[in-house]
Every structure is written in C-alpha cells, then in structure tokens.
C-alpha cells in the first residue's frame, strides 16, 4: 500500500502520448488490458512549459467505475514535478471507457501521459538548442 492507502498493484498500465484526438475520440483506442477508451480530452500543454522547452511525463493511477467514468484519480509519479500534473489530471477526468465487463469497477489503472513538444505538437516552437524535428508519427496507445 502507498501512503494514500492505494494498492501498489496496477491492473492495467498504458502510455498515452499527449495528442490522441483521432484515435481516442474515434473510439478505437485500446489499452491492451481489455479496457477501451471511448472519449476524452487531450491534455493542454502548459504554456510556461512550452515557452521554456520543458518536456516530461505524468503517471496517474485511477479506478474505472461501472459506467466507465474515471474515479479516485491520483498522481503516481511526475517528471519534472509540479509542471504537468494539473494538465494531465484535467484531461484524464474527462476520459470515458467502455463500461467494464462483468459490471464491476476496475481498480488501480495507471496511465502515463507523455508531454513532448516535437512529437505531440509539431506546430510548437522546438525547445532551445533542439536538433531539427523529425517527421511526426501518428500517436497511439500501447501497453
């Protein structure tokens, strides 16, 4: 158990790049754990982090209620701390999953949201002293 009382066992774990719009909102994203994300907002890249060229990630842990809503949302880890947590939590609060099979809530799902300027926001200014950007690839969800 962690200090917050949550189990350290995670039922599902997946990585979600910041821009997912086409995949997620089309309802065809899957976490590889039998959970299907149907809809939800993308995180908004914090302007201060964007202007300073800061990149990072946030890992959140949460439960999925029987109706597919995200509940009991907490930050598990963030790098750098204090930069992307609010944006990540605001986005994940809007996520809706296909209701879990068996009519039971799913506990301890973890998602890592990556905040990368060049990959997620091809139109954003690159971080200071960044090498030329590579062509963007389509973001996806992976276990």
Image: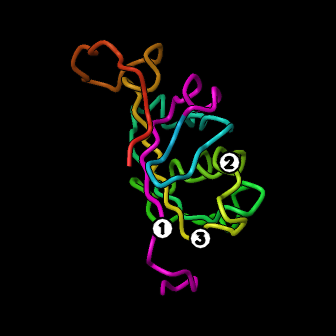
- What is the spatial separation of the Cα atoms under label 2 and label 1, in whole angstroms? 16 Å
In percent of width and height, residue 75 lies at 54, 64
N-terminal of the two: label 3 or label 1?
Answer: 1
Earlier residue among tags 2 and 1: 1
Residue 98's disc number: 2
The segment highlighted magenta reads 1-28
Q: CA distance from mark 3 to mark 1?
A: 7 Å
Residue identifier under label 1: 11
Q: Between 105 and 4, which is closer to the camera in this rendering?
A: 105
Residue 15 magenta-drawn? Answer: yes
Q: Nearer the viewer, residue 92 or 11?
A: 11
| Residue 41 part of the magenta segment | no
Left or right side of 50 for 41:
right
Nearer the camera: disc 2 or disc 3: 2
Q: Is residue 21 above or below residue 16?
A: above
Contact, mark 2 vs mark 3 (Cβ under 8 Å): no
- Whole-percent x and y of residue 9? 44, 76
- Within-10-Å neighbours for mark 2: few <14, some 14–19, many 20+: some
Name the residue rendered at 54%, 69% in the picture: 108
In what element is the residue under mark 2?
A: loop
């Amino acid at each position: 158990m962690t200090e917050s009382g949550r189990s350290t066992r995670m039922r599902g774990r997946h990585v979600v790049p910041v821009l997912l719009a086409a995949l997620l909102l089309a309802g065809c994203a899957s976490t590889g754990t039998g959970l299907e994300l149907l809809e939800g907002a993308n995180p908004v890249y914090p302007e201060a982090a964007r202007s300073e060229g800061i990149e990072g990630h946030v890992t959140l842990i949460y439960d999925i209620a029987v109706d597919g809503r995200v509940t009991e949302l907490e930050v598990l880890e963030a790098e750098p701390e204090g930069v992307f947590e609010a944006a990540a939590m605001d986005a994940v609060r809007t996520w809706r999953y296909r209701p879990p099979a068996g009519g039971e809530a799913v506990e301890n799902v973890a998602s890592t949201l990556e905040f990368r300027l060049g990959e997620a926001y091809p139109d954003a200014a690159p971080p200071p002293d960044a090498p030329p950007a590579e062509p963007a690839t389509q973001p996806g969800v992976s276990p």
